[in-house]
Amino acid sequence: MTQTSPVPEPALTSGDGDGDGGAERGPASASAPAPRPGVRRPRVHRPRVHRAWAVAAVTFVTIIGAAAFASLPGLLIDPLHGEFGWSRGMIGFAVSVNLALYGLTAPFAAALMDRFGIRRVVVCALAVIALGSALTVRMTQSWQLVLCWGVLVGLGSGSMALAFAATVSNRWFVARRGLVTGILTAGGAAGQLVFLPLLSWITEHHGWRPAALTVACAALAVTPFVWFLLRDHPADVGLAPYGAERFTPKPPPVTGAAGRALRALADASRTGTFWLLAGTFAICGASTNGLVKTHFVPAAHDHGMPVTTAASLLAVIGVFDIAGTVASGWFTDRLSPRRLLAIYYGLRGLSLMFLPMLLDDTIHPPMLLFIVFYGLDWVATVPPTIALCREHYGENSAIVFGWVLAAHQIGAALVAYLGGVARDALGSYDVVWYCSGALCAVAALMSLVIRHRPAARPAPPALPPTVPAAA
């Protein structure tokens, strides 16, 4: 449950988006009417650092902790193939179910956050992730992998997908939204940096079961941070959003989460922009989560590179992903998101075309150049995509982005499965790398077709509500 004070304390921000997060809050305008007799204005809350930054920090830590589940699938393919004899296509199918449900759950999760609050939804999601990951250690059949890792972990991770970051940035920030979105999105990469080397070492020295239990423990470890430190809305603590010109009351819970998510999809699907965003983001998922995150480690291992070394390279991608995503958020606040997307997809496609020639049994400078280049571009597409959703779909932007994310994960799921099938049939991943590079070039062209929508004229600032004086 959210915690509210007996008397909310609305706060006005300067709205200039300066470094103090709008903490400077001046008195009401001189042109404002004087209070009526017997009525006093509420005391203005003046935190030195806006609470929005604390909420963003908790969100960032939560995304890092939950990123453990995303780091494991690529490490499981060879151990599961060796222990159970399951084909790479079968294991890839389980990963594809996980990725598809991750995406299809996201729009409903955004609506559920509006209905039940961010904290409740995220805590339940973390519990489901921990349960699914822990149950995998008891599996003996391939359908159990699909159920535990595919269905349970997929549903849990989808409930706190990128829609989580979009909802937090939309509610708590007016200024610096692009930057905050980039930072929160980079949390997944930071988690990858933390967990990939650890999980690869555990898998190599102790087996895949302790690694799966580590994922479960990581999901449970961040749960207290969410419950005790996260707040659903700035109004819960008597604040305006960071950079806002006026206090915004907390909206009432929105019932009918599933219906709202479907209505948002129906409305958005009537616009060409939605299909362009969904198409480009599907290619984004195919060329990142579906391909590199799932198949890079086994592909490098095919060329004689040790699993730990390949996983470390994937973790280094996460290092540069953090820098690239934060920079992308900064650029999104200042440049055209359409042009940014075209640049990002074009550069990504170029790098994937060169990857088959770079894979080897050892690390060499051209491979390191690919890691840096690709890492800077990994999730850089997220801030401009969220910005375009916000520009075109307003208050439903988080839900619409959830549907766009569903397309992202469907693309990822298809390539996670087809990549394994191609490896079984052809003996290498080369064709998959080349096809993904060509698709990225198509996504770059699609991004340039998205039209610009002029921003609506802002409403005049409202005065804070008056509070009757105590008798």
Image (tube, rainbow, N blue to C red):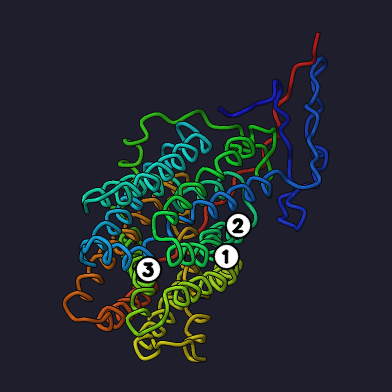
How many residues crowd mark 3 within 10 Å: few (<14), some (14–19), many (20+)?
many
**Alpha-carbon distance for marks 2 and 1?**
7 Å
Name the one closer to the observer, 363 or 256. Answer: 363
Q: Read off the residue under disc 1.
A: 329
Residue 35, horizontal then vertical, whole percent: 80, 24
The answer to whether 436 is drawn above or below residue 184 in the figure is: below
Residue type of the residue flagged with mark 1: Gly
Q: Name the side, left or right, on which 406 lies relative to 50.
A: left
Does 210 sit left or right of 79 as displayed? right
Q: Quadrant of residue 463?
A: top right
Place of residue 97 in the rendered image (x, y in percent of width and height, measured from the top left):
27, 54
Asked if the residue under mark 3 is in contact with the one under mark 2, i.e. CB atoms within 8 Å, the reply is no
Q: Residue at x 69, y 45 (%)?
A: 245
The disc label shown at residue 284, or none: 3
3D distance between C-alphas at marks 1 and 3 = 17 Å
* Sequence-wise first label, 2 or 3: 2
Q: Label 2 belongs to which residue?
A: 180
